[in-house]
Amino acid sequence: MTSHRFQPQGPLSGRLRVPGDKSISHRSIMFGALAVGETCVTGLLEGEDVMATAAAMRAMGATITKQGDEWRIHGVGVGGLLQPTGALDMGNSGTSTRLLMGLVASHAITAAFTGDASLSKRPMGRVIEPLSRMGASFEASPGGTLPLLMRGAQPAVPIEYRLPVASAQVKSAVLLAGLNTPGITTVIEPVPTRDHSERMLRGFGAELDVEEIGGERIIRIHGEAELKPQQVVVPGDPSSAAFFIVAALITEGSDLVIDNIGLNPTRAGLIEVLRQMGGNIEELDRREVGGEPVADLRVKHSALTGIEVDPAIAPSMIDEFPVLFVAAALAQGTTVTSGLDELRVKESDRLSAMAAALTLAGARVTECEDGLVIEGTGGEPLAGTTGEPVTTHLDHRIAMSMAVAGLASRGGVEVDDTSPIATSFPNFMALLEGASQ
Ligand SMILES: O=C(O)C1=C[C@@H](OP(=O)(O)O)[C@@H](O)[C@H](O)C1
Ligand SMILES: C=C(OP(=O)(O)O)C(=O)O
């Protein structure tokens, strides 16, 4: 555990660049490892979560190396994954676990999945259920958690699966299992979630179609696919940029440009909500990078007003709520959020963790069953923590959100453990320090 006190540090200005998108980075390694030939990836996020995916794909036969700024992946072909000799250690990463369980489900592989204390509490029943229907079998810990052992099915059975939770990880697990399954595997998504798997699988040459009927998305993947190696350019992660967007909005005098941010509509909910609150966020040089819309964002200090956040927007900003709560704590008036049950099953219970942390830092927060209600200060800094530090519960987003709260406090915010930040944003502390110089 490495504790740190985050202090007010003056306006954020100049330009900065955050690391590559975590979701796209995981997928570029997985899909590269299933293509025949060499995939090259630039802008890959070198965080611990993505490295857990890389280690697992190596353990199942792929060759993954870094030369200069470029990652090169020699794939084994769909159906060609090898039996790993040891357990696959997923660290802190839900995305690695659920997507790789999907891949293993349609290979003749038996694999043990393990993870850290946070990941070992997270629900895997949501992927065990559809993957069992496809023929895989499981021995999981009580409650459907890690560690677990799974046996893939060869051949697997194609299914039509309606997602019971809005989850891109569950959607992707079924689609990835479908890659090596004869016939057509169908996922019905009542509420759209991030669509990187669909975009990238198409880019790698899979036959995948998406039909929209009455707001639902019906995604069909043709099995026994052949993936072709690609040149992937990973855009900057909007979920990482979120910390700097909020930091600039709530710190007086700030005028910051964050370069090269992915603005896929299934990820851009936070920007919309912050604009509704009065945030001044300008998109510069909108363009396309690696098949994703991208822009540089210019963010200026703004007087924010509390709002009622429409729960329908939640899937497009699911990882950004912790830092939105910080913005709300500094806004004028009340912010009400609801429909956020999924936040209770992330790296931590993010509703209770943020309610406790913000309260300790002097904010006025009420925790409800499926959201938080926050009375903002109207721009006045929070008091900050005095005695005990805030608890991050092995959750990178709690640590970074409370770092941002520290900037907008009188006495600073003490965070008990900054080490989880390395899972998604290894240079966060250095960038934060540099942004005010
Ligand atoms: O598919 C992905 O890359 C992700 C999906 C989301 O999880 P859920 O599918 O559990 O909502 C998100 O929270 C996670 O950080 C990354
Ligand atoms: C929920 C997250 O990641 P994962 O599910 O991959 O652990 C996150 O990065 O906020």
Image (cartoon, rainbow, N blue to C red):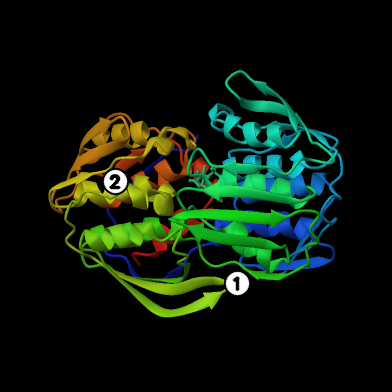
**Image location (x, y in percent) of residue 42:** 65, 69
Against 204, residue 186 (above or below) is above
Q: Is residue 114 left or right of residue 23?
A: right
In the image, what residue type sits under mark 2?
Phe
Return the residue nearer the eye: 76 or 135: 135
Tag 1 secondary structure: loop
Q: Earlier in the sequence, mark 1 or mark 2?
A: 1
Which dot marks residue 280? none
Q: What residue sits 43% from the left and 38% below the top?
A: 342
| Residue indicated by mark 1 | 290
Task: Specify the quadrant of the image occupied by residue 351.
Answer: top left
**In the image, what residue occupies the spot 49% across and 35% down?**
394
Q: Which residue is tagged 2?
A: 325
Circle 1: residue type: Gly
Q: Residue at x 47, y 39 (%)?
A: 395
Residue 321 at x, y percent in the picture: 36, 47
In the image: residue 321, left or right of residue 58: left
Alpha carbons under labels 1 and 2: distance apart: 31 Å
Q: Is residue 184 visible?
A: yes
Residue 89, above or below 138: below
